[in-house]
Amino acid sequence: MAPRHTGGMRETNTDFTRRQALAGLGGVSAIALLPACAASRPESIAPGLPSGSAAANAADTKLEQIAYRMLAHEPGRATGLGVDTGKYAAWRSTFGTPGEAGRAAYAASLKDMVAEVRAYPQDGLTSDQQIGFEVIETAFSRAVEGMALPYGDVAVGSWRNAPYVVIQNVGAYIDMPRFFSSTQPLATADDVGPYLDRLMEVPAILDGERERIEAARGMGVVPPAFLLDKAIAQMQASLAEAKASYAGPLETSDLAGAKSAAPQAAQIAARGIVPALERQLAELKTQRAQAKDAAGIAAQPMGEEYYAWALGASTTTNLTPDEIHRQGLAELDELHAQMNPILRKIGYSKGSVGERMRGLAEDPRYQFAQGDPGRKEIFAFIDERLAWIKAQMPRAFTQVVNPRLEVVRLPLSEEPGAPGAYGGAGSKDGSIPGRFWINLRTTDLHRRYDLADLTFHESIPGHVWEGEFSNRLPLIRSILAFNAFSEGWALYAEQIADELGAYEGFEVGRLGFLQSLAFRACRLVVDTGLHSKQWTREQGRQFFVERNGSKVEEVASEVDRYCSWPGQACGYKIGHSQILRQRERAQNELGDQYDFRAFNTALVLGGNAPLSVMANTVSRYIASAKG
C-alpha cells in the first residue's frame, strides 16, 4: 500500500547539495525548485521473459514496458513492489513531480498507453496476455475518466479514489509517516542517502496537495464539517509527531550512517515538513469555516457525475445506485435469515437480528480486556487463528504459498480515522512482508466472535494470500488491482475459512462471519443512501446499528470513510456475490467434475482483474475441467 504520488523521475543536480537544501528550508520549500524531467520510457526490460513465438515475446515486452512507464509516475509504488533496482534505482530517491503538474503528466501518459493497448494486434497472443491488455485498458481508461473530473484524487489500478485530496483518511500527512517507517528501505548504508532525498521532497508534496484543495475550494468543493474536524485533529497530531515520524526510523536503525543522518532528518522535518503541514492545517481550518454537514458527494459540484464514475471504478460494473441499493437490502435479509436460528440456539431469541447482535456485543464472554492487556489478548487470538488457517490451506488450494506476514498495530495518529483493520501483500521481490494492520485505539472495536473472520479477510486466505499470487504474475498484473476483486476475494476468503470448519465447536464465531457479510450488504445500502439518496451521517450510522447490530464505535469511522471514499464500500459485496455466482456456474456446468480446490486455485491464479475478466477466468477453468 505504497502512497500514490504522481510525477516523473527527478534529475540529479550535482550543484544542489543536501546541505544546501537543508540551509534553504523555510518559508518556501526549496524542494519545489528542484528540476524534474519527463517520465522515462524504457526501451528494454529486465532479462527473464518467457520464450515463445515472436508475437508472444513482443507482447510480453510491451506489457513490461507499460508497467515501467506507469511506475515512472509513481516511484514510491515501485519501491513498495521492490522493483526500483538496476536501471530504475534512481527512483528510490524520489516521489516524482508533485501536485497538478504531476497529475497532468500522468493523465497524458495514461491516455497514450490506452490508445496503444487498444491498437495492439491480438494475433498470436496467449490468453494470459490478452487478459493483461484488457486489464490495462480497463484500469487506465477508468483512471483517465477520473482525472478528467475537476477535483479529487485518482488511484490508478488501486482502490482509494477520493474527492477530497486531504481529509481524515487521505493525504500525505497520513501516507508519508507510514511509508518512511515501513516501505522506504533502510537495509544497507547506501539506503540512507535516498531516505534523506525523498524526505526533502515531502514539503513539496504537501504543498502540491494544499494547492489542489485550495483550487477545489475555489470551485465550491468543501468537505463535510465532521470530516474536517477529524482531519484537523489528526493533522495536529501529525505535527506533534513529525520528528519521531521522519527521524525516528533513522534513530532506531543499526546502519552505519543512519544515526548520524537522523539530525538532518529532524532538521528537514522542522524546517520543511512542519511548515508545510501548518500551511495545510491553515487551509483545512479555512474550509472548516465554510463547511456544512451534508454527508454525500451529491452536495458537491458535479457530485452526481463523480459518484457515477466512482461506483464504476469501484465495482467494475455499470450498476446504478438504485440497483446497488436494492441488492444490498435483499442480501441483508438473506443473511439475517441465516443468523436468526444460530442466535436462537445460543439463547438470543427476542427482538430483531440487529437488536440481538447488539446484545451479543455487550456479552462480556466475547469482549477483550480494556487497554494493553486486551491488546495482548487480541494479538494472541490472531496468532492462533493464523496458525490454524495456514494448516488448512492444502485443503482449499492445489497450490499453496507461505507468505511473509507481520501483524502490526496501526500508527497511533492514524487510528482515529482508520477502519478496524486492513491488510495487503508485501513487495514483489519479497523484501517487504505482507502486513495485517489492526486498529487498537480501543479493544472495544473487536470481539472474540468477529476477530477470526477479520483475520482471514485481511491476511490468509484474504488480502495477503491473494497478493502473494498476484506478485508472481507479470509486473503490470501485480501493480493493477481492482476493488471489487480484491475485496470480493477477501470476503470469499472468509467463506473458505468457514467451509473449512473455522467455527466448528464455536458456533457464535459463525455469527461473526455472517455478520461480516451482512455488514458488507449494509455498505451497499449506506453508501448509495449517503451519496445518491441524501442520507445524513447519522442515518448511515443508525442503519448499521439498528439493522445489523453493528458496534457504534466501529460504524462511526466506517460511515465517515464512505463520505470521503464514495463508492469504495460497494466493491466488497458486489465482488463477493459475483464470485459466488461464478462458482455456482462452475458447479452447475461441471457437476461431479467440479473441484473446490481447483476452482479456488484457478480464481487466485487468474489474478486481480475486473469482474468481467474474472468470469473469463472461470470459463477457462470450466473448459479445462471438461477436458
Image: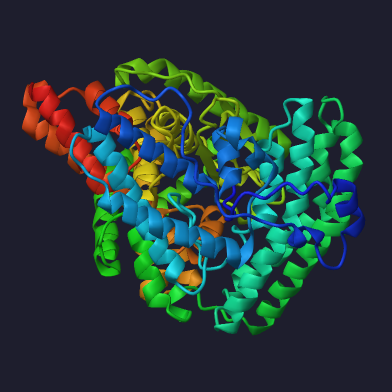
The reply, left or right, for residue 213 in relation to residue 26 is: left
Which residue occupies the foreground of this view, 338 or 624?
A: 624
Please report the residue visible at 91 percent of the width from the left and 34 percent of the height from the top: 260
Residue 466 drawn at (x, y percent): 40, 32
Decide if residue 585 is in sight here. yes
Please report the residue visible at 51 percent of the width from the left and 72 percent of the height from the top: 151
Decide if residue 369 is in sight here. no
Residue 604 drawn at (x, y percent): 32, 31
Residue 71 drawn at (x, y percent): 52, 45
What colouring method underlies this structural image?
rainbow
Which residue occupies the foreground of this view, 226 or 33?
A: 33
Q: Is residue 388 above or below residue 205?
A: above
Please report the residue visible at 25 percent of the width from the left and 33 percent of the height from the top: 55
User: Total marks drawn?
Assistant: 0
Point out the image quarter for the C terminus. top left
Point out the image quarter for the N terminus. top right
The reply, left or right, for residue 130 in relation to residue 353 is: left
Residue 284 drawn at (x, y percent): 69, 72
Please report the residue visible at 27 percent of the width from the left and 47 percent of the height from the top: 120
Q: Is residue 611 above or below residue 308?
A: above
Q: Is residue 582 above or below residue 176?
A: above
Which residue occupies the foreground of this view, 430 or 223?
A: 430
